[in-house]
């Protein structure tokens, strides 16, 4: 590739960000570290500002460098999509980066990805499963599947489903500690809770048509619903988590639903979040439409 033009500068800069160092970027691009350094310096001189702060151990980006990185990633992605669509006569293709929560991703998104790539075999799906929130505007993902209410942002969100919550425990735990018959009985039990910011400190219930909530406490907190389900399976305590996470466990008898007469029936929305607008890649629109189609079936 020719690294003398502005697009070449962008390729070098984004590769440095991806690889984490000038030497690693040089190996990935087939250049020498000094050549990569010269290209970065040339870009900084042309823009009239410092983009990188370099030390012997690591590199960090200035605010201008972060802005340039976001713009460069978008421009390179657009260029690649234009060339790919022309070269392949409009057949959807390219790399689609999808982020989903670990438990829901494994149970619900992975099977859909297999069906999606069967329909669009020239689209490569780069699927990341984890409970951290990725920055779509910074180019960390094209589509993220997120639970619960969403904060205000310039991103576009499409509701693709919802899930309820259920209180569960293993038969072993209940045999050792007894079965709570009223929500207030939870005060005598070890309750496994989420630790992320939007997690409510109380668990909601309903009795005689009146909603109420109760504080619960326990010695384990976790960011992953799948991990909480696993902890409940091994008898660590009682958890209140998404139905999708434990449906198979309940069916097998590995977990028992509790306090169902007091379940308020609250539903948590599931959204596909992405950067919309006229420049949205076709593969992003196709994937979001596919998620909506599968939900409606």
Image (cartoon, rainbow, N blue to C red):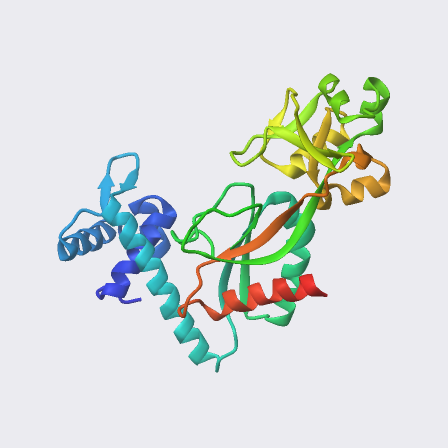
Name the side, left or right, on which 19 lies relative to 151: left
Residue 289 on image: x %, y %: 58, 67
Where is 228 relative to 252, above or below? above
Q: Residue at x 85, y 28 (%)?
A: 171
Residue 278 showing in the rendered view: yes
Residue 255 showing in the rendered view: no
Residue 190 on image: x %, y %: 71, 21
Residue 80 on image: x %, y %: 39, 69
User: For the N terminus, which image quadrant?
Assistant: bottom left
Q: Residue at x 61, y 27 (%)?
A: 221
Name the side, left or right, on which 1 lies relative to 137: left
Among the 4 quarters of the image, the one containing residue 118: bottom right
Where is 132 relative to 218, above or below? below
Among the 4 quarters of the image, the one containing residue 169: top right
User: For the C terminus, which image quadrant?
Assistant: bottom right
Where is 235 relative to 95, above or below? above
Query: Which of 1/277 is in front?
Result: 277
Q: Residue at x 65, y 55 (%)?
A: 161
Query: Which of 153/59 is in front?
Result: 153
Query: Which of 35/9 is in front?
Result: 9
Q: Residue at x 69, y 24 (%)?
A: 191
Name the side, left or right, on which 279 lies relative to 63: right
Residue extending farthest to the bottom is 89
């Amino acid at each position: 590739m020719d690294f003398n033009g502005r697009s070449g500068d962008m390729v070098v800069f984004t590769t440095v960000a991806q690889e984490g160092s000038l030497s690693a970027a040089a190996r990935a691009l087939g250049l020498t570290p000094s050549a990569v350094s010269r290209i970065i310096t040339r870009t900084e001189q042309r823009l009239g500002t410092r983009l990188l702060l370099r030390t012997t151990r690591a590199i960090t980006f200035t605010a201008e460098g972060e802005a340039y990185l976001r713009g460069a990633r978008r421009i390179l992605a657009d260029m690649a999509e234009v060339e790919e669509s022309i070269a392949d006569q409009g057949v959807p293709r390219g790399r689609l980066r999808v982020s989903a929560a670990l438990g829901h991703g494994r149970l619900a998104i992975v099977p859909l990805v297999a069906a999606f790539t069967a329909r669009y075999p020239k689209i490569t799906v780069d699927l990341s499963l984890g409970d951290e929130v990725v920055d779509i505007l910074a180019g960390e993902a094209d589509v993220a599947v997120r639970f619960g209410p969403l904060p205000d942002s310039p991103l576009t969100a499409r509701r693709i489903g919802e899930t309820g919550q259920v209180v569960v425990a293993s038969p072993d735990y209940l045999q050792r500690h007894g079965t709570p018959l009223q929500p207030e009985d939870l005060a005598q039990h070890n309750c496994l809770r989420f630790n992320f910011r939007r997690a409510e400190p109380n668990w909601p219930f309903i009795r005689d048509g009146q909603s109420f909530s109760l504080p619960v406490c326990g010695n384990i907190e976790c960011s992953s619903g799948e991990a909480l389900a696993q902890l409940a399976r091994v008898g660590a305590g009682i958890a209140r988590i998404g139905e999708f996470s434990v449906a198979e466990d309940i069916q097998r008898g590995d977990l028992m639903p509790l306090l169902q007469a007091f379940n308020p029936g609250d539903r948590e929305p599931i959204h596909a979040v992405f950067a919309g607008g006229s420049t949205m890649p076709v593969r992003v629109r196709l994937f979001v439409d596919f998620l909506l189609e599968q939900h409606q079936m």
